[in-house]
Image (cartoon, helix red, strand yellow):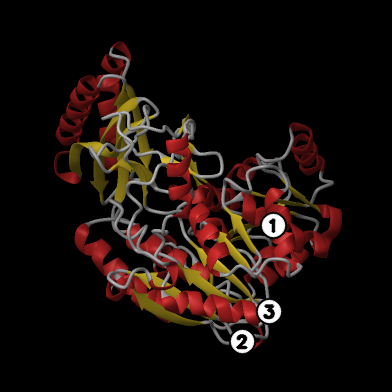
Amino acid sequence: APAVMAPRFEAFLLWGVTASGKTEVYLRLARMALECGGQVLVLVPEIALADELVASFRARFGDLAVVAHSALGVAERWAGWMAALSGRARIMIGPRSAIFAPLAGLRLVVVDEEHDAGYKQEEGVGYHARDLAVALGRFARCPVVLGSATPSAESFANAKGGRYRLLRLSSRIGERPMARVELVDLRARASDGGAGARAAGATSGARAGGATSPDSIAAHRAAEQAPSSAPLSRELVSALRENVARGEQSILFLNRRGFYSFLQCHLCGTVLTCPNCSVSMTFHLRDRSLRCHYCNHRDRAPDDCPGCSGYGLGGQGFGTEQLARLLGELLPAARIERMDSDTSGRKGARGRILAALRRGEIDILVGTQMVTKGFDFPNVTLVGVVLADLTLNLPDFRAAERTFQLLTQVAGRAGRGDLPGRVLIQTYAPGHYSVRAARDQDYARFIRRELALRRELGYPPYVRLALVRVGGDDSAAAAELAARAANMLRAAGAESLSVLGPAPAPIERLRGRYRWQVLVKSARRAPMERAIGAMREGIAAKAQRNGVYLGVDIDPVNMM
């Protein structure tokens, strides 16, 4: 509060457990800023969260709060931008692009869920909105509040090192207890037929494409009636059934959309992949399509295998579409809704789903990570994490951190009212330190272990990173240029840099472009920038002649 009244620049890390009242802190600080005649900028990581926060701010401040995001029409965005420029709008709320809002009288900047990767802009002009917010606060001489229940390792280290001031909210509003979290070990259930879900194996042999003959129609029916591959344990199904019977609401989190993760022929082994990217295509049952979730390429699911022309295509893996369908079969009396980018992409769809949940018209909400944070529904007493391991084994040094954050955030949706909450986390890795810390909702223990590993292995926040990305239509040309870039970096950096690579990117081909990358580590930013500048100057002309793209991402968030 003194920093708002002064005003003066100071960066605060507000570390508060879920449902501890961080939004109320933002609202009270915003009131102070407005009473001093200033403006307020509030950043959220996703458009889905903007609607909830806007409702809270508008309930308190009326039309003084406006929102700006890409889902709005051009006229709506223009009106909000001009209202901010003229001073009619005193509070601007939006995702990362709102950092550029024309606010001349800034008195407060808030970054909610500061840990979220959504704040990083990777295409075009790259920036991290959280870091820009701190720079903006320094420039405008106003305080910046970074809020999270699971602060990023970098922000926590900044707070411990004195760059940020650490503020704690260690208990929920009204001293409500945290939800009880239990781990369900899926390893012990691998041989019991999937318990409540009727199967733990994929349905190879079932046809997934369009039907053009009596035989293919029969195969289609077989696919739709085949046992599910979604691992729903007896404990989770029983808990859902009991919650529905009590008239309470549940959220199921699965960070994978679609029906099947991919289609594979059980006769020849062919997997249907994207023609533009080196990834398999996801099967969506609703329109029987195959979709690439990276470049959005779509195909009609075929009847026969393109590899052997046989009729052996079957689904492997599972997503939210299959999970919602399965729950409808297991709990026919339950009102089930799905919230992912497939169901809530149209304007107003997300708001309608959340409004129905608030009115009690939904018993079970199935969703991806857009249901894990920012929502406050007092009647949600049960949260189920269908598979906690999806993010745990990604080739990214932040995999454990993101897993902990997702699990802790989604667990925080349960028990936010007067009724106690329960969380069931299904996992094949119950002994992993991030999963165990999420079970105990113990951020302090997790971050101690995570920072010790980061220090030992040489990763942020103890070093600075730069990811040099090289891509082109010709894989050999991209590989050659990546090798040249790595050699020049080693020569320019001498002993001050650690250069890893070149190596193919984890997703080697994306949107028709072959990709290679070089990772640069340095304890100090200045020598890293000098070496990168020399490298770019030395090979930029050659890259242009060969039609190869060369990009540098400082402090990368996405390592894929």
Q: Where is residue 207 in the image (x, y as percent from the top left)?
A: 40, 42
User: In which image quadrant can residue 240 be found?
Assistant: bottom right
Q: Is residue 46 left or right of residue 457?
A: right
Task: Return the mark for residue 53.
Answer: none
Task: Specify the quadrant that holds the C terminus.
Answer: top left
Q: Is residue 467 left or right of residue 359?
A: left
Q: Nearer the viewer, mark 1 or mark 2?
A: 1
User: In which image quadrant can residue 484 be found?
Assistant: top left
- In the figure, 123 relative to 167: above or below? above
| Residue position for label 2 | 176
Q: Name the kind of residue labelled 3 in the image.
A: Gly
| Residue position for label 1 | 353
Q: Name the kind of residue labelled 1 in the image.
A: Ile
Q: What element carries label 3?
A: loop
Give the spatial CA distance, label 1 vs label 2: 27 Å
Q: Position of residue 188 (x, y in %)?
A: 28, 76
Inspect this view and state whether residue 383 appears. yes
Query: What residue is rendered at 28% in x and 51% in y?
Result: 395
Q: Is mark 2 on a helix, strand or loop?
A: loop
Mark closer to the chain start, 1 or 3: 3
Asked if the residue at tag 3 contacts the one at tag 1, i.e. Cβ–Cβ closer than 8 Å, the answer is: no
Q: Name the kind of residue labelled 2 in the image.
A: Arg
Mark closer to the chain start, 2 or 3: 2
- In the figure, 271 relative to 254: above or below? above
Task: Return the mark for residue 247.
Answer: 3
Residue 283 vs residue 131, the one in the foreground: 283
Give the spatial CA distance, label 1 vs label 3: 18 Å
